[in-house]
Structure formats: C-alpha cells, structure tokens
Amino acid sequence: MAIIQAEFDGQAFIPCQPVQLPRGAKVGVLIPDQPPAQTPEQEQEWTKLLQEIQASEPPFGNVDEALRYSRKRPLKKSPPHSTHSH
C-alpha cells in the first residue's frame, strides 16, 4: 500500500504524482481533521509575520542562486542582484 498526496479540485481528488492504477479503481481517501481555529492573538502574529516576509528583500536574486547556495556550489559568474518591490 502506498500513501500519496492529492489535491481536491471541488469535485475529485487529483493525485499530485503519477499513480499506477486502472481507470475506475476504488481507493480510500484519508481526510484530515480541520485544524483548530486560531485565536485573535495567533491570527495577529501570523499577519505580522506575513507582512514582514512580504516587506523583506529576497536573500537570492533567482532560484539558481538559491540552489547553488544550498548545494554549496560556488557561482561561476555572479549576475547583478535585482531588487523587487512589493
């Protein structure tokens, strides 16, 4: 038995990766409980954090720079760092 991730599109569950099942195969779907509602204080903290993230400058100019850094590979040529406005 395998566990996969799926996305509900409002009518059906769509697998997030390919599955090897015949058309019409019956499967079980585990539906997680709804997370508990947040308190006003928690909602305020999350809103503040989101605002800080949106206002901050990204640490890398592009995805390639982030991947090279995460893989500890030096950049061969540093492209100019672009600034993004929000």
Image (cartoon, grey):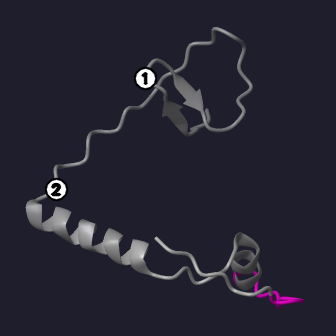
| Among numbered discs 1 and 2, the one appearing first in the sequence | 1
In the image, is 38 to the left or to the right of 10?
left
Whether residues under marks 1 and 2 lie with C-beta atoms below 8 angstroms apart, the answer is: no
In the image, is 52 to the left or to the right of 26?
left
Which residue: 62% across, 38% down?
Answer: 16
In the image, the segment drawn in magenta is: 70-78
Q: Quadrant of the N terminus?
A: top right
Secondary structure of residue under mark 2? loop
Q: Residue furthest front?
A: 85
Secondary structure of residue under mark 1? loop
Q: Label 2 is placed on what type of residue?
A: Gln
Q: Residues within 10 Å of mark 2 (few under 14, many from 20)?
A: few
Q: Label 1, label 2: how many angstroms apart (C-alpha)? A: 24 Å
Residue 82 drawn at (x, y percent)? 66, 81
Residue 43 drawn at (x, y percent)? 18, 62
Quarter location, residue 48:
bottom left
Residue 73 magenta-drawn? Answer: yes
Q: Nearer the viewer, residue 32 or 49?
A: 49
**For residue 48, above or below residue 18:** below
Which residue: 16% across, 50% down?
Answer: 37
Q: Nearer the viewer, residue 56 or 8?
A: 56
Which residue: 35% across, 78% down?
Answer: 52
Q: Residues within 10 Å of mark 1 (few under 14, many from 20)?
A: few
Q: Which mark is residue 22?
A: none
Q: Nearer the viewer, residue 14 or 43?
A: 43
Quarter location, residue 5:
top right
**For residue 22, above or below residue 41:** above
Residue that badge 2 annotates? 38
Q: Label 1 is placed on what type of residue?
A: Gly
Residue that badge 1 annotates? 10
Q: Residue furthest left?
A: 40
Which residue: 59% across, 81% down?
Answer: 83
